[in-house]
């Protein structure tokens, strides 16, 4: 049944899924034992009813009727309690398994290279992490155990019916082959509709995530009506996929009721004939009628539960595909909490995001400890790619990057990222307090340290004017703050984490002149005593750099101080004069 195999049931996926229950195997087996007990209790109540009607009522034994009635109520209470505990334990196991899977999936994905997220829609991943894993829970809480319970209950009931009257049992089971055939058609219809529903849910999630995030673009270009039409179409297809599943249920359940009524009719026809010769009793007739209802109910539930199981397997297949995706950067090195000085060498570095579409070509560059080096060049020249390689968001294709004389690949990922601070043009703030956005919930960074850093960087005054100051929540993506304010907070964030190497990627390209003055001050404060790489379009911000590197089409074309490059009257001079 997997999304790729096309089989009715994929045992490979099932084995992997069942393996996830190992930490909860004891509870799982307790639940299975309760299912067995409930199944064997099934024939008890109809049998008690038969004794009351056939044995005690004809004798006028009121005391006997009371005793059997008490036993009947007692067994009903026991069955209800067993059902309660079975449902509670099964759901606790199911939710625990899916909690573990969700945590493992997030832990797995959080180590992926950024190019995975570049090509994967966020809404699709959200669907996998939430909706699909929720669907897997039903495999353990409903599908697997309930199918086992229904099969066992069916065996017990039919066995008891044969024990009571094998001829009548065969008569009432005449419609069963029709039911089996109808069930098979129902399963296929629901399976197909479910696949459609999951695909449409993913499409809706992707659409909403993208359009809520980019709502300003929709409104700026007056596209609300057109985008609503696109959403209406996706929403309609999502509704239609659900309706196809509902249609299958609306046909199947009446068919089951019809066949159940047919079995009861056959029982009455056969039972009346036998009653005329004194063989069939009213109690036995009532017991068989109850058994027929009990027999059809698990058959109907089995069809439904098998679909739940199939749906869970489709979900599991989607989730396991992400588990099987190996997009994490190689990091076999253990963290040593090393503190780097910040001497950087690029030695014949080549890099491409895909195949051999080179973004950087034969980069050779030495940056000494404490130097401020600026990269300038046209958009798409490869400047930001250099920053990405230093943070190991991406791995270079050939050549070598050395930090303090040692390959960057010989440091652990955490050691590199702890020592390399990055301030981006597009600052991301979480829907949390300013304090937590700066510390990123690092317990080693105190509130006093944040306030001291803010005073040095020049953000303390504007933060204190906010409601709640450092406890102010700037909203999703920091939408309650201006671009310049968000940028300044990102400077404080970099400052308190004390990186040995600081990378400023277009940090002043989209702020006003007042914010730029503050950011200039913050830049000077941050770059003191540490190796700094500044990527900028505004050449006014990098004139004090020790070294300016001009990048064009992935290559270093010029290098020197501001005055040296102006004297050359080359690429940099043209940029500056422009």
Image: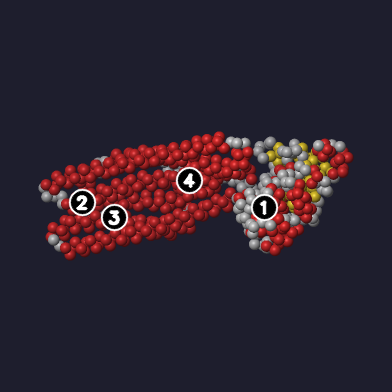
Which numbered mark, 2 or 4, is in the foreground of this view? 2
Distance (Cα) linking label 1 and label 2: 73 Å
Q: Residue at x 59, y 46 (%)?
A: 326
Which numbered mark, 4 or 1, is in the foreground of this view? 4
Residue 192: horizontal and vertical position, in percent?
43, 38
Q: How crowded is mark 3: few (under 14 residues within 10 Å), some or many (20 or more)?
A: some
Distance (Cα) linking label 3 and label 4: 33 Å
Q: Mark 4 points at which residue?
A: 315
Q: Name the residue under label 1.
A: 413
Q: Mark 3 points at which residue?
A: 42
Residue 338 in sight here: no
Q: Residues within 10 Å of mark 4 (few under 14, many from 20)?
A: many
Which numbered mark, 1 or 2, is in the foreground of this view? 2
Q: Which of 129 and 394 is in front in this view?
A: 129
Q: For the residue labelled by badge 1, is the local secondary structure a helix, a strand or a loop?
A: helix
Q: Say which quarter of the image contains residue 554.
A: top right
**Label 2 vs 4, first from the N-terminus:** 2
Residue 277: horizontal and vertical position, in percent?
11, 47
Q: Name the residue under label 2.
A: 286
Q: For the residue labelled by badge 4, is the local secondary structure a helix, a strand or a loop?
A: helix
Q: For the residue labelled by badge 3, is the local secondary structure a helix, a strand or a loop?
A: loop
């Amino acid at each position: 049944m997997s999304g790729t195999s096309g089989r009715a049931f994929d045992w490979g996926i099932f084995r992997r899924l069942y393996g996830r229950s190992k930490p909860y195997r004891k509870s799982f087996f307790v639940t299975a034992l309760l299912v067995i007990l409930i199944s064997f209790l099934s024939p008890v109540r109809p049998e008690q009813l038969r004794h009351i009607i056939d044995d005690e009522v004809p004798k006028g034994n009121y005391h006997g009727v009371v005793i059997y009635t008490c036993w009947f109520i007692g067994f009903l209470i026991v069955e209800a309690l067993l059902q309660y505990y079975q449902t509670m334990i099964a759901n606790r196991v199911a939710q625990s398994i899916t909690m573990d899977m969700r945590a493992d999936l997030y832990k797995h994905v959080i180590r992926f290279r950024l190019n995975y997220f570049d090509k994967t829609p966020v809404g699709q991943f959200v669907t996998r992490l939430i909706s699909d894993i929720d669907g897997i829970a039903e495999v353990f809480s409903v599908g697997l155990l309930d199918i086992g319970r229904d099969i066992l209950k069916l065996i017990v009931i039919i066995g008891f019916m044969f024990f009571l009257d094998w001829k009548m049992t065969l008569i009432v089971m005449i419609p069963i082959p029709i039911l089996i055939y109808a069930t098979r058609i129902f399963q296929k219809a629901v399976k197909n509709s479910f696949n459609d529903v999951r695909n449409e849910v993913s499409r809706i999630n992707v659409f909403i995530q993208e359009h809520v995030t980019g709502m300003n673009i929709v409104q700026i270009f007056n596209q609300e009506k057109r985008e609503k039409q696109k959403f209406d179409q996706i929403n309609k297809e999502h509704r239609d996929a659900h309706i196809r599943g509902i249609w299958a249920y609306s046909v199947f359940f009446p068919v089951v009721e019809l066949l159940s009524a047919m079995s009861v009719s056959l029982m009455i026809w056969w039972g009346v004939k036998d009653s005329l010769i004194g063989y069939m009793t009213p109690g036995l007739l009532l017991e068989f009628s109850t058994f027929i209802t009990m027999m059809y109910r698990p058959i109907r539930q089995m069809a439904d539960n098998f679909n739940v199981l199939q749906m869970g397997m489709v979900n599991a297949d989607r989730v396991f595909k992400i588990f099987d995706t190996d997009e994490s950067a190689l990091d076999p090195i253990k963290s040593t909490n090393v503190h780097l000085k910040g001497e950087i060498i690029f030695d014949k570095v080549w890099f491409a995001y895909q195949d051999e579409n080179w973004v950087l070509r034969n980069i050779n560059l030495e940056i000494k400890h404490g130097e401020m080096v600026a990269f300038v060049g046209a958009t798409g020249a490869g400047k930001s790619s250099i920053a990405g390689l230093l943070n190991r968001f991406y791995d270079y294709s050939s050549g070598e990057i050395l930090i303090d004389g040692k390959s960057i690949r010989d440091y652990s990922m955490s050691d590199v990222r702890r020592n390399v601070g990055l301030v981006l043009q597009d600052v991301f703030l979480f829907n949390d307090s300013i304090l937590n956005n700066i510390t990123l919930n690092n317990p080693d960074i105190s509130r006093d340290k944040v306030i001291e850093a803010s005073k040095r960087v020049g953000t303390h005054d504007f933060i204190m004017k906010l409601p709640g100051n450092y406890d102010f929540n700037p909203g999703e993506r920091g939408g309650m703050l201006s671009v310049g304010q968000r940028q300044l907070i990102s400077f404080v964030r970099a400052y308190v984490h004390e990186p040995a190497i600081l990378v400023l990627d277009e940090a002043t390209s989209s702020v006003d002149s007042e914010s730029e003055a503050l950011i200039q001050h913050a830049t000077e404060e941050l770059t003191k005593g540490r190796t700094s790489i500044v990527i900028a379009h505004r050449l006014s911000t990098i004139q004090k750099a020790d070294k300016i590197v001009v990048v064009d089409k992935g290559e270093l074309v010029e290098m020197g101080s501001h005055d040296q490059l102006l004297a050359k009257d080359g690429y940099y001079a043209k940029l500056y004069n422009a």
